[in-house]
Amino acid sequence: MGQHSKPRLHNAMWPGLVGKGNDEGQEPPISLERMLDLTASAKVNGQRFEGIDYFLFLPHTDPSASDDEIRKIADSIQSRGFAVGSLVAPVWKGTVGDSAMGDQAAREKFLEAVRVACRIAKVFNEHGVRKYGVIRIDSAEHGVAKWREDAKANTSKIAETFKQAAKIAADHGERLAAEGEICWAGMHSWRDMLNLLEEVGMPESLGFQADLAHTYLYLMGYNAPDCALIKEGYSEAEFYAAYEQMTDKLRPWTIDFHVAQNDGQVHGAGSHDKTGKHCPADDPNGKLDIVRCAGYWLKDAAARGIEHICWDGCMFPNATLEKTETWNTILSTMIKVREAHGW
């Protein structure tokens, strides 16, 4: 281990699920056990991943599983030497939840998804496998067309749902992190994300989850051209000036962080709308200096209660996920992030 022990290094389990399925053209999901084994097999200079972040839905987890069934999953995770960090609440239509700006029935489903996540979190916490991390949400409203019909009113509706969700989380001793991503209405640009966080106004209970791949597209103004901070053909100096501007606004809210790479393209698979394309850590088309960019988000991270960082390889092809070298390269990159910005 290097000079820093924190943030702990986690891998996400949901790349085995998101965008996967049994429809034509889709790759099959990868089981939780297989994702755990692939993560456990990675090793760089004696360092391994220290934990996992986890999506609370099928086929990895039945959200209505009994406490005993959840404890068995916890045992399986812990047996590999892993902690559980952040949990993804099943807030989307087709899981437990529905749109945070929908009608009353839809919004009640959204809140039920947060209750489900808090219940499972409590089992993990009492088991001992989980001692840190947040519960991740988003607006669960795909695309921005419907939101644009009345942007102000729809943002207020999402904010009201988030306030209720944050209260549920706080009552369970949890914090919610809203992941900024160009496909989620009301969260599709850095400015709209900031407006929403400020309208919720509960920083102790609801913050921001920054992902390097998704926030890169915030800079480019995808889905919100008036919010673009840089244009195609930008210089390195222009990029970092814009990056600092964006991170200075969103970093104070940031309580969860995904290390990732992006090639500037949008990508979608299955029911997951077009969003930032996650690339392998060593992708030759990657636009980001991962270690340098991570530093903008991790400044004062410990003061915001961040205990770990997580790699997000969402929508990687299965063949990429199955390769040991994929995970060794990712782990090596995360070690560099910790060496540069850890504590």
Image (tube, rainbow, N blue to C red):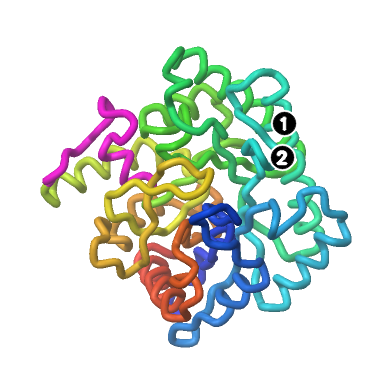
Q: Which residues are magenta?
A: 214-234
Query: Residue at 61% across / 54% down in the picture?
Result: 86
Residue nearest the observer in this picture, 112 or 204: 112
Q: Residues within 10 Å of mark 2 (few under 14, many from 20)?
A: many
**Secondary structure category for the residue under label 2:** loop
Residue 126, position as x, y percentages in the image: 81, 58
Residue 300, position as x, y percentages in the image: 43, 51
- Residue type for callout 1: Lys
- Residue type for callout 2: Val
Residue nearest the observer in this picture, 130 or 212: 212
Query: Residue at 69% across / 60% down in the picture?
Result: 60
Quadrant in the picture for residue 139? top right
Q: Given contact means CB atoms under 8 Å apart, are the residues at marks 2 and 1 in contact? A: yes
Looking at this view, name the residue that lies furthest to the front: 24
The disc placed on residue 35 is: none
Residue 74, position as x, y percentages in the image: 76, 66
**Secondary structure category for the residue under label 1:** helix
Looking at this view, name the residue that lies furthest to the bottom: 46
The disc placed on residue 96 is: 2
Would you say 289 lies left or right of 60 here? left
The disc placed on residue 109 is: 1
Residue nearest the observer in this picture, 306 or 243: 243
Query: In the rendered view, would you say 58 is above or below 337?
Result: above
> Cα distance, mark 2 to mark 1?
6 Å
Quadrant in the picture for residue 143? top left
Residue nearest the observer in this picture, 287 or 300: 287
